[in-house]
């Protein structure tokens, strides 16, 4: 059961989704730039829960050679850095709405030419390429209402190559609502729910049909 502060947090962002996608995106950019006024505000690089979630996520990936990988909502690039280590031959893209977070993400990968970062949001981003592995973790609940989830899910699906893999990781049981439109558009390959943690979460793995 979500805590009261978490419920209020979700309510705030659900209210923001009454704005236009452009207006909502502007507020989210300002909020996350404010949040990142200090490094790693969610302790993604040091918190044991986050580290367990990253490790579990990587363990659920279908084993194959991934050429192009994108992480939507990459923040300061903690998981992006882990992806670069796990897939040393892949081109990796991180996307986030916070310029401050992206500046630290670039420092974290220390000039790795295989890794790039884009300042954009999922509701309005128009990708210049497709990917065979897409990640979206702890992001969709910021978008609020049903129509925004539908739009964001369509945008995520549009990032995929034929025979691509999409991984969505969100709190449980809220993930059931957040992943609804991904379930309607893609084939779910696997879902694992982790409840023996401070904050239960679900890892859902989806695939597109080969061309």
Image (tube, rainbow, N blue to C red):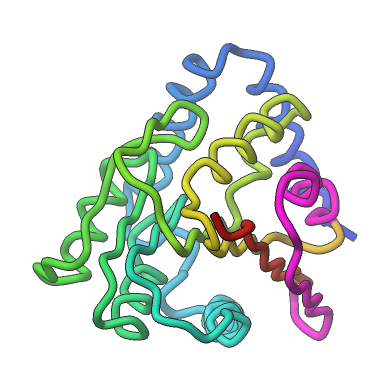
Q: Position of residue 79 (x, y in %)?
A: 41, 71
Q: Position of residue 116 (x, y in %)?
A: 21, 56
For residue 53, above or below residue 135:
below
Extreme residue toward the front, this view = 211
The residue shown at (37%, 70%) is 78
Quadrant assignment for the C terminus: bottom right
Q: Position of residue 138 (x, y in %)?
A: 60, 56
Q: Position of residue 95 (x, y in %)?
A: 36, 48
The residue shown at (40%, 80%) is 65
For residue 150, above or below residue 162:
above
6 horizontally vs 59: left or right: right
Quadrant assignment for the N terminus: bottom right
The residue shown at (82%, 53%) is 174
Magenta run includes residue 183: yes
Question: Foreground: 153 or 65?
Answer: 65
Extreme residue toward the right, this view = 1
Write down the quadrant of residue 163 in the picture: bottom right
Magenta highlight range: 174-198
The residue shown at (39%, 49%) is 130
80 horizontally vs 1: left or right: left
């Amino acid at each position: 059961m979500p805590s009261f502060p978490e419920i209020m947090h979700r309510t705030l962002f659900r209210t923001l989704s009454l704005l236009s996608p452009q207006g909502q995106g502007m507020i989210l950019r300002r909020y996350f730039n404010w949040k990142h006024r200090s490094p790693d505000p969610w302790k993604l690089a040091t918190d044991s829960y986050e580290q367990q979630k990253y490790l579990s996520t990587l363990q659920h990936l279908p084993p194959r050679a991934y050429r192009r990988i994108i992480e939507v909502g990459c923040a300061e690039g903690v998981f992006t850095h882990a992806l670069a280590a796990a897939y040393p031959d892949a081109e990796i893209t991180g996307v986030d709405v916070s310029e401050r977070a992206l500046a630290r993400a670039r420092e974290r990968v220390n000039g790795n030419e295989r890794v790039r970062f884009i300042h954009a949001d999922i509701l309005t981003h128009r990708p210049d390429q497709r990917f065979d592995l897409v990640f979206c973790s702890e992001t969709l609940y910021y978008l609020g209402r049903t129509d925004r989830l539908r739009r964001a899910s369509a945008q995520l699906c549009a990032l995929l190559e034929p025979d691509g893999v999409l991984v969505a990781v969100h709190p449980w049981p809220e993930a059931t609502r957040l992943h609804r439109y991904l379930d309607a558009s893609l084939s779910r390959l696997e879902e694992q729910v982790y409840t023996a943690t401070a904050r239960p979460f679900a890892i859902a793995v989806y695939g597109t049909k080969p061309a």
